Image (cartoon, rainbow, N blue to C red):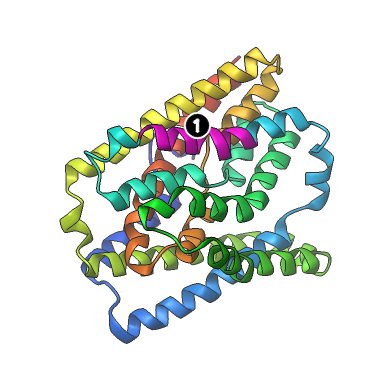
Amino acid sequence: MQRPRFLPDNMTLLLLGVILIASFFPARGAVAEVFEQLSVWMIALLFFMHGAKLSREAVISGLTHWRLHLLVLLVTFVAFPVLGLLLKPALLPILTPDLYVGILFLCMLPSTVQSSIAFTSVARGNISAAVCSASASNLLGIFITPLLVSLLLKTQGEGHSSMDAIFNIVLQLLLPFVLGQLARPFLQAWITRHAQVLKMVDQSSILLVVFVAFSAAVVQGLWAQVPKMMLLSILGVSAVMLALIMGLTMFVSRRLGFSKEDEITIVFCGSKKSLASGVPMAKVLFSSGSVGMVLLPLMLFHQLQLMVCAVLAQRYAKR
């Protein structure tokens, strides 16, 4: 039975459950330190499996469609951050500085992989181009996102220095990813047979990092700093950003003469932001005390983009 399109997906429900647990029973002291170390190893395992799953052939086969991929990357890593900066005067009066950092951080993240491809498929778009664009966005994001964080957040007093950020990303994310790519010829058959197990590893890694981040934030008074109206404000800001970016991708792709199939790929790959990449990156790039607040806008945006894209994919499919 198909899930109604406006209901949250299973991962979102699990995230909400983890946030509730962390809110009432946050990890403290020695327990928090154990979970912190475990989350580091889980993130390394997550990116190792991402490297092992990513098909080099799929990326290479789509590289000839360079105009489409360039447009997706420009929207993801240029238009989104510029929008986040332009909204700063309107956002700072209604959000805390950490929440604005969270909005700006979400603007710097790469696109999703699985859901971008899935929605492109449902909408009858260019699936091979979606595979290439989403994969390239995630791979380049390992380098681009920490550089953008260093450039755009240094005045906010957040993030590490540029060299620290790059070193941490290389050590905790890129190195496991490369090792996964090298191990792919030996693991490919096993990965195919155990796809559900690997999905559980992905989700468990994200849930553990979210629990650790929100535990630290709750101990420091997260919910006292974020009233209900502020949560609604974040959701409203997310809706505005998503609408503007989707409108931009549709307008530009049509003006540049892309086919409807390519337009669909550009809209879904260009407007999405990856929770799977964003959670571990935030863990590496920000101090433990601010990660929970920084991740809050991303998790709200994640659910909103899934609901909106589900509706839009169905509309495209009926054309």
Magenta span of residues: 73-87
Q: Main secondary structure of the magenta part?
A: helix
The residue carrying mark 1 is 309
Residue 257 in the image: state x and y as whole percent.
70, 14
173 on left or right of 14: right
Residue 159 in the image: state x and y as whole percent.
44, 60
In reply to whether residue 83 is colored magenta, the answer given is yes
Say which of 39 and 150 sits in front: 150
In the rendered image, the vertical position of residue 131 relative to residue 123, given as above or below = below
Can residue 191 be seen in this snapshot?
yes
In percent of the image, x 44 and y 31: which residue is there? 242
In percent of the image, x 60 and y 35: which residue is there? 269
In percent of the image, x 71 and y 58: which residue is there? 53
242 on left or right of 232: right
Quarter location, residue 168: bottom right
Say which of 191 and 165 sits in front: 165
In the rendered image, the vertical position of residue 260 relative to residue 214, given as above or below = above
41 on left or right of 117: left
